[in-house]
Image (spheres, coloured by chain):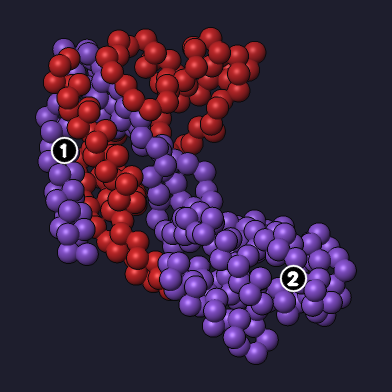
Amino acid sequence: MAGELEGAKSLSGLLSGLAQSAFHGHAGITEELLHGQLYPEVPPEEFRPFLAKMRGILKSIASADMDFNQLEAFLTAQTKKQGGITCDQAAVISKFWKSHKTRIRESLLNQSRWDNGLRGLSWRVDGKSQSRHSAQIDTPVAIVELEFGKSGQESEFLCLEFDEVKVKQTLKRLSEVEESINSLMQAA
Amino acid sequence: MKNVFSSLHLQRVGWEARAGSGSAGPVPATSCLAMAESPPLREPVLDAKSEVTCQLIDFQWKLGMAVSSDQCRSLKYPYVAVILKVADHSGQVNSKSIEMTIPQFQNFYRQFKEIAAVIETV
């Protein structure tokens, strides 16, 4: 039966399923589904610990955001330990992490962001504007629409109006942020 | 005949009627006629912010670094968080907090520089 658990394609599929479930929020990927689709010949009592082991390995790699050196060392250690993984399985896991790392990391970052995330920005500048609330005429106006929302929730929209003075003031504030970012990057 | 216009759509129609001289991002709406015939593209919310244009009164910012979380021990995620204080035409003031990644902020900043460049020429 161990041979059944060796198949690279099945393991690759399993890792994809685990990633969908653990990181990308796909609720429907159950143990039964993975077992039936990928390892139908393997008895459930053998599949269950195997699934738990792979899930644990994938979560450890993702949680540590391993680079490729760390990954190599980690997987080598896993092949050497009792009840660990085979070299072929290590190769499949390595290949999987290399191609899915960025996306998994993005999902983890989204999960850790509890406030609204910026989703979009659109703008236009109008040459002339009149408003019943204001006597300003012939004043160029920038209209900026921000789209934002919490993870998994629908977007909210905020529509802001800026005159030239306000645009410049905002730009000045934004340059302060940029300066801070540059200091942080230099210090890193 | 059921009126499928919401105040949001009336705002969009108003935009279409004004002369514009520069824009970025997706076009705000399809043609006015198409808007009249099709159901709303997004649900209008009762929140005043999405139905009127607001003035930005102030914004506060912070540059943060998320180090670790229960889901990921090694986050190492720098982010910019802003709180926008906005007022609508009735004077009602609201605050909205938004977080962005560094690349998102840099795009935001770049867009504002473009706005500044365009608004000067109008």
Among the two numbered marks 2 and 1 on one chain, the one whose residue lies closer to the N terminus: 2
Output the chain of dot 2: A
CA separation in Å, label 2 and label 1: 57 Å
* Hue used for the chain lettered A: purple
Q: Is residue B8 above or below residue B60?
A: above
Q: Nearer the viewer, mark 2 or mark 1?
A: 2
Q: Is residue B78 above or below residue A59?
A: above
Horizontal and vertical percent for residue A31? 76, 68
Horizontal and vertical percent for residue B80? 28, 53
> Which of these two is toward me, A9 or B48?
A9
Horizontal and vertical percent for residue A60? 52, 74
Tags 2 and 1 touching, CB below 8 Å: no
Horizontal and vertical percent for residue A68? 45, 67
**Which mark identifies residue A6?**
2
Q: In this view, does B64 lie above or below B8?
A: below
Residue depicted at x 22% and y 13%: A127
Label 1: few (<14), some or many (≥20) within 10 Å?
Answer: some
Instruction: Report which quarter residue A33 is drawn in.
Output: bottom right
* Hue used for the chain lettered B: red
At mark 2, the secondary structure is loop
Farthest-out residue, front: A87
Q: Is residue A48 above or below residue B6?
A: below
At mark 1, the secondary structure is helix
Residue B49 shows in the view: no
Q: Find disc 1 in the rendering and name its residue.
A: A171
Residue depicted at x 15% and y 44%: A175
